[in-house]
Image: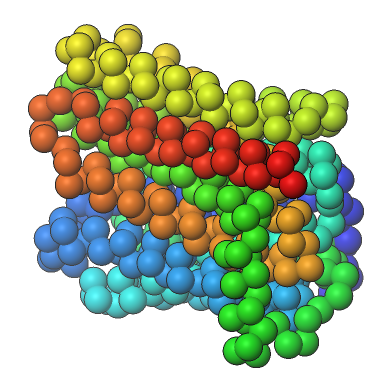
């Protein structure tokens, strides 16, 4: 089959990498409306169905430290094809799963495929771009990726209106196959030189110690992770706060959630535009982190003064998610460019820390939520926002003092 090479710095290239990264939110959010149907169909409790999401996220998190170094050794393109192939095969298995145990098992492997795709997307951007161009590219990829959680619940609900829950996994199979074909036909190997020792134990451990010991690289990765924790505290806490405490309808909640996701898109778009105009990334990061901390603290004040309503919470939530769209592409690129020779391993650490922070935020919400106030969501968001700003302040001071 003839190769149709997609050139970097083109819209097609951005859409391809954005679609690759979008497999994660599509895999999470498309299936959420089907949870009751899966429980009824397979005769299991809601908690057991929830394991399909938990194991997917576990697969996603654990795959990144493997795919990153392997791509440094064997190249990005073959590992991308393996990740997408695994995602496609696992979703085929989910479509025909005869039991909940089988569904949970294959969702874990679907998560591995999605995690590999995200890690290798970051490494590919680092291979092909540098500086402001890389930050701009990541901004636009983040914009494309953010469309997925906006449309995914609607797609999932629409599929359930005409078919059963198995069709959702069938649709994910088709989506993964399209991305896989796009990579096979359009993507050249982006890595300039392969490290033949990258997966040997001494080099593997050494590379990860190099990432963890580099204050700039690890510092920016931690800033990114803590910022993600702030956003994930909103994702985990918003249904509890808005549906259970404030009593909004599911339709209204869907509209509000989509609106805050558009806030991320707006931040990503602005980041891309300003990077293209050579605005220093430090200004974008500093402004975004400061505004995120202010908006999160304002959420706490609204909560503790018992004035929390949709009209008082919603504008602050939009501002906060806008900040993440502005922050993330810049801190990720600053982390990756610190150690470009081991971009796969660095991308794995960036992704793993982000997932760890998101999981911690979700656990904090679940553990401290009291069932009748909005305080916990605001307080956890504030904790992560302030920690992210403090970490960036330290990293920035370290860089300027060298």
- The x, y position of residue 359, in whole percent, is 35, 54
Instruction: Determine the image quadrant of residue 229.
Output: top left
- The x, y position of residue 73, in whole percent, is 73, 81
Q: Residue at x 66, y 52 (%)?
A: 216
Examine the rendered structure and indicate whether residue 303 appears above or below residue 397.
above
Examine the rendered structure and indicate whether residue 215 appears above or below residue 253.
below
* Quarter of the figure with the N terminus: bottom right
Q: Residue at x 76, y 38 (%)?
A: 136
Q: Is residue 297 left or right of residue 302?
A: right
Residue in the foreground of this view, choosing between 74 and 101: 74
Q: How is the image coloured?
A: rainbow
Q: Is residue 327 left or right of residue 235?
A: right
**Of all residues shown, which one is farthest toward the front?**
401
Residue in the foreground of this view, choosing between 395 and 150: 395
Q: Is residue 24 left or right of residue 135?
A: left
Camera sees residue 284: yes
Residue in the foreground of this view, choosing between 177 and 66: 66
Q: Is residue 301 left or right of residue 69?
A: left
Q: Residue at x 81, y 79 (%)?
A: 194
Q: Residue at x 67, y 28 (%)?
A: 284
- The x, y position of residue 212, in whole percent, is 58, 64
Q: How many labels sit on residues?
A: 0
Instruction: Determine the image quadrant of residue 232.
Output: top left
Examine the rendered structure and indicate whether residue 317 appears above or below residue 216.
above
- The x, y position of residue 38, in whole percent, is 24, 59
Camera sees residue 84: no
């Amino acid at each position: 089959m003839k190769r149709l090479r997609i050139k970097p710095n083109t819209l097609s290239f951005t859409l391809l990498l954005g679609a690759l990264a979008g497999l994660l939110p599509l895999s999470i959010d498309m299936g959420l409306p089907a949870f009751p149907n899966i429980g009824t169909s397979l005769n299991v409790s809601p908690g057991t169905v929830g394991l399909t999401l938990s194991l997917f996220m576990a697969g996603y998190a654990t795959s990144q430290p493997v795919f990153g170094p392997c791509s440094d050794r064997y190249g990005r393109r073959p590992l991308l094809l393996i990740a997408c192939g695994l995602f496609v095969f696992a979703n085929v298995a989910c479509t025909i799963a005869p039991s909940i145990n089988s569904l949970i098992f294959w969702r874990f492997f679907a998560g591995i495929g999605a995690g590999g795709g995200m890690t290798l997307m970051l490494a590919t951007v680092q291979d092909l771009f540098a500086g402001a161009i890389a930050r701009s590219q990541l901004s636009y990829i983040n914009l494309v990726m953010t469309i997925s959680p906006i449309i995914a619940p609607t797609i999932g609900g629409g599929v359930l209106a005409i078919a059963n829950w198995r069709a959702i996994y069938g649709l994910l199979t088709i989506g993964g196959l399209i991305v896989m074909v796009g990579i096979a036909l359009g993507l050249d190997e982006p890595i300039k030189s392969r490290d033949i020792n990258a997966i040997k134990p001494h080099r593997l451990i050494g590379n990860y110690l190099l990432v963890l010991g580099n204050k700039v690289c690890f510092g920016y990765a931690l800033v990114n992770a803590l910022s993600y924790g702030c956003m994930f505290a909103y994702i985990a806490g918003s249904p509890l706060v808005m549906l259970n405490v404030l009593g909004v309808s599911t339709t209204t909640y869907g509209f509000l959630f989509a609106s805050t996701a558009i806030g991320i898109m707006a931040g990503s778009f602005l980041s891309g535009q300003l990077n293209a105009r050579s605005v220093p990334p430090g200004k974008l990061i500093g402004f975004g982190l400061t505004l995120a901390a202010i908006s999160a603290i304002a959420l706490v004040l609204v909560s503790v003064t018992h004035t929390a309503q949709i009209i008082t919470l919603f504008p602050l939530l939009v501002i906060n998610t806008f900040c993440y769209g502005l922050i993330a592409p810049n801190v990720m690129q600053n982390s990756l460019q610190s150690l470009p020779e081991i971009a796969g391993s660095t991308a794995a650490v960036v992704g793993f820390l982000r997932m760890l922070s998101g999981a911690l935020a979700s656990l904090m919400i679940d553990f401290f939520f009291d069932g009748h106030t909005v305080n916990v969501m605001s307080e956890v968001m504030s904790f992560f926002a302030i920690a992210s700003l403090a970490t960036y302040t330290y990293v920035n001071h370290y860089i300027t003092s060298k």
